[in-house]
Image: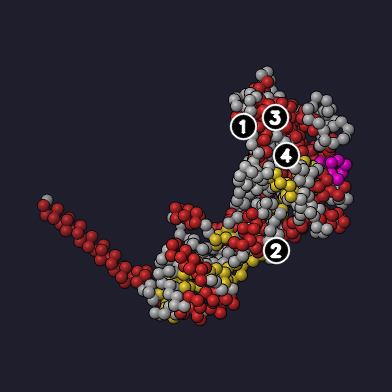
Amino acid sequence: MEEIRKRFIQGFFILIALIYVGRLFYLQVIDETYKLDAENNAVRKLIQVPFRGLVYDRNKKLIVSNTVVYDLYVTPKKARVADTLRFCEMFGITRTEFDSLTHLAKVYSPVRPSLMLRQLSRQDYARVQDAMVDYPGFDFQVSALRTYDSKAMANALGYVGEISPERLLKQEETGEDYYRQGDYVGVTGLERQYEEQLRGERGIKYMMVNSRGVEKGAYKNGEFDKEPIAGKNLITSIDINLQAYADSLMQHKVGSVVAIEPSTGEVLAMVSAPTYDPSLLSGRTYSKYFQQLNLNPMHPLLNRPPSAYYRPGSTFKIIQALVALQMGVISPGTGFSHAGSPINCSHSHPVASDVQKAIQYSCNPYFYQTYKRIIYNNNERNVFKKSAFGLQKWDEMVAKFGIGQSLEIDLPNEKKGKLPDVPYYDKMYKGELRWKFSNIASNSIGEGEIIVNPLKMANVAAIIANRGWYIRPHLVKGIGKVGQIDDKYKEKISVGIDRRHFETVIGGMVAAVNNGTVSGDGRMSDIQMCGKTGTSQNRHGENHSIFIAFAPRENPKIAIAVFVENAGSGGAHAAPIASLCIEKYIKGRVDRKAIETKWMNKGYPLNIIRTTPKTDNAKNATAQKDSAVKKVDEELFLTSSQTLPLMGADKPNAVKIPMKPKK
């Protein structure tokens, strides 16, 4: 037994010795990694940044490409500058700038390369290359500058900028080791959403250098080199011709245009006005122009379609009618007079004797009575509980249209908006079931606490066009090739309303366009557009103009939503812009030249909200309601395109800045 134990111990130590010997043999004879590290003084490791993927429109027209430029990196511990004045003259910088840049590099890391100067042109690189042998510790790396073949779609595309310290820190926390200080990343829009696909894979190149830092050729004939792999190309759903045309119609205005192909959910155009030239945020001019754009009170950097807040106004009446028809509280032939409604009608018209006429004339009393039937459609006698039960059912059905929900579009910063529910009103009125129908009646016409963005209302138009379903809106129809997208952008989503009810509503939308609330500039003789006007209340100036539509009536090709801030009636201002976009997309041209010129040159006075009004504490239900509505208004306008909050109690509450249209 003793002999067995002795041999076991001997065997154990022999095994450990063999493991160590084997490991040493592998490290010293087989693995070249440590040898490469040991030769670091003679071998230079160069990181090769891949080209970002290109961006195309739906017809394979190039939108975003790359131009080769050169970035200068410095490794402080290796850097030697015998003649600082000469160095500064070569690169066109001052001594103060040189000292500041080298100091920042030392703070970042004395031993790691740090970006010093970015985006030198081919000509600049060729001019200084030979002289750089006198400046060890400085290395050039090939980079790329985003180049734009069109100025359209800037907000949806987004821009590329230097990675932030916060993003670098987040990378370290996740264990990823891709980005370095000074690297470019997608900051907003599609550039950010598809960053991992667009950025590609880095390459590594090892070069032999002499004692002066002059490259003497590839190390080991490139055995350890890794070629960079370019990022994948994005094929967007955007029609760049329609996008540019819609941009031109929205010049001198603040607002949005969103156009969707109903059958696929593909976004055909996404306009945010005012916009900017994307080339301004590409290259060495980035810092200068970003500050100008960021401080602009019209917020050109905000992508309004998924992010700006508005009340839907009368465009919401379409949803109201569909929910009521599905619940059976009204039928297609149900009529209501104006009697008994505290909400007056804003249009002079005959009595709305059925649903279609109510939509045609956008009758407020009709939808007040309709909403009242929805809320009270139960057997509960308690007036407070009755309102709560009805609201809960209404809320569930409206939410299926995407109101108050995320549509999960492939863009960052999509806002859900607001769809008020029972807990919301319980909290607003400081206790459970202390409110009733009269407190929420403004929801009947798309006002009150309902908040949407333009993207949602374009999707509502697509739902109507499809007679009851939609595919999540998306801007990319292929990564690398068409069809290579997330499966969720292929899924049909039903809103739970019978098809026959949509035909009733569509009849009213046709009547609204042909002989209702849409003005003459918004009508086309050869294309049947189905639309609904809306006027969104604005406590800080002229009301916002809204129009949603699709065309043609059968086999629709395009659904659209147009929002124009401070313009007034939806039928008079937003509808003509929508009709011109529809004509351009379906026909490929616009024949109504006089109307086109008129709306390209049209502009509106704009209000800029400077401070947040204070709200008084409510002491009763009415005061609570006023305070709550005011709070909703503040939230709405503090996130809208008009708002520029300023600090300090001495600022004026509102400053009106007129914007004159070009003549």
Disc 3 target residue: 440
Distance from disc 2 to disc 4, alpha carbons, whole Å, reads 37 Å
In the displayed structure, does residue 283 sit left or right of residue 4? right
Residue 246, placed above or below residue 617: below
Binning the other alpha carbons within 10 Å of mark 4 as few (below 14), some (14 to 19) or many (20 upward) gives few
N-terminal of the pair, mark 2 or mark 4, is 2
**Region rendered in magenta:** 509-519
Residue at point 72%, 29% (across, down): 441
Binning the other alpha carbons within 10 Å of mark 3 as few (below 14), some (14 to 19) or many (20 upward) gives many
Q: Closer to the observer: label 4 or label 1?
A: 4
Distance from disc 3 to disc 4, alpha carbons, whole Å, reads 18 Å
Residue at point 76%, 52% (across, down): 659
Disc 1 target residue: 424
Disc 2 target residue: 150
Q: Nearer the viewer, residue 255 or 400?
A: 255
In the displayed structure, does residue 526 sit left or right of residue 471? right
Where residue 159 sits, quadrant-wise, is: bottom right
Residue at point 47%, 78% (across, down): 83
Q: For residue 482, say whether it is visible.
A: no
Which residue type carries mark 2?
A: Ser
Q: Position of residue 461 (x, y in %)?
A: 74, 44
Contact (CB < 8 A) between labels 2 and 4?
no
Residue 562, placed above or below residue 239: above
Which residue type carries mark 4?
A: Arg
Disc 4 target residue: 539
Q: Secondary structure at mark 3?
A: helix
Contact (CB < 8 A) between labels 3 and 1?
no
Distance from disc 4 to disc 1, alpha carbons, whole Å, reads 22 Å
Q: Nearer the viewer, residue 201 or 592?
A: 592
Q: Is residue 170 magenta?
A: no
